[in-house]
Amino acid sequence: MTGVEIETERLLIAPVGPGDRPEEFLPVFNSNADYLEAAEDKERYQLEDVELYLWQETTRENSRCLAIRLKESGELIGTACLLVPHPREPAPWIGLLLLRRDQQRRGLGAEAAAAIEAALVDEGWEEVHLAVLTSRPEARRFWERQGYAVDDERPNNNKRLCWVMRKELRRLPAAPA
């Protein structure tokens, strides 16, 4: 996944690069006002906020910032960021998986999560972690449906209480020849 595009049935997931424009990401964030309010005490992102997100997540050590696009049209519908591995733990973390509101509840988030997990398995990782704000129980339910379990409860870097979730990664058996 380091620099590699992931293709699923409906999605193209690729590292953010010079051709990705911050204005494409703005609707992804602004369609998720509940996330912005809970995570950052903001109602809306400005273009500068997106530019900062993209800069931070593409330059941070061990960070992978991803653009999630519809395969059929190439339209940007989401973003994800990973820390592989997390600087303080010997495992990768999904720091964010965010889809534009009108693309949610169609199975695309689950498809993106599964593709990211499969790429991590291909790199040899055996588990993955993430944190969900306790103020966002619907996000916790999403991740539980993907096979994650709460491992701990603690404040994040912004002192917001989170459920720390973990999932063991397994390589799927190869199809018979």
Image (cartoon, grey):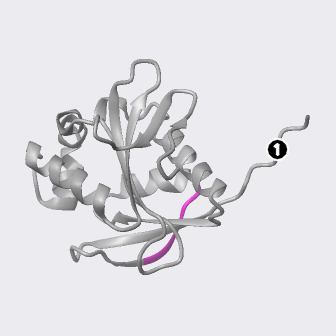
Q: Quadrant of residue 75?
A: top left
Q: Residue 94 appears at what percent x and percent y?
A: 43, 59
For the point 42% across and 81% down, which residue is it? 88
Q: Amino acid at mark 1?
A: Ala
Which of the two residues, 24 or 59, is positioned nearer the viewer here? 59
In the rendered image, residue 148 lying in the magenta stretch gets the answer yes
Asked if one can make out residue 98 in the rendered structure from this viewpoint, the answer is no
Give the image location of residue 138, x and y in percent. 38, 52
The residue lying toward the viewer, choosing from 164 and 169, is 169
Residue at 34% from the left image edge and 71% from the top image edge? 162
Decide: few, some or many residues near mark 1? Use Cα within 10 Å; few <14, some 14-19, many ≥20. Answer: few
Q: Residue at x 17, y 40 (%)?
A: 30
Where residue 37 sits, quadrant-wise, is: bottom left
Does residue 36 appear left or right of residue 127 in this picture?
A: left
In the image, residue 88 sits, relative to residue 68, either above or below, namely: below
Q: Nearer the viewer, residue 123 or 39?
A: 123
Q: Judge from the rendering whether residue 14 lies leftward or rightward of residue 30; answer left or right.
A: right
Relative to residue 87, is residue 57 depicted above or below?
above
Q: Is residue 130 magenta?
A: no
Count numbered badges in the picture: 1
157 in relation to 142, above or below: below
Q: Can residue 37 be seen at all in this image of the molecule?
A: yes
- Under circle 1, the secondary element is loop
Question: Which residue corresponds to the image point at 58% horizontal and 56% vertical from the top-left?
Answer: 120
**Outermost right residue:** 177
Q: Main secondary structure of the magenta part?
A: strand
In the picture provided, is 112 more to the left or to the right than 124? left
Bounds of the magenta span?
Answer: 147-152
Up the image or down, 73 lies above or below 160; here it is: above
The quarter of the image holding the C terminus is top right
In the rendered image, which residue does mark 1 sit on? Answer: 174
Expressed as whole percent of the image width and height from the top left, the position of residue 125 reads 62, 64
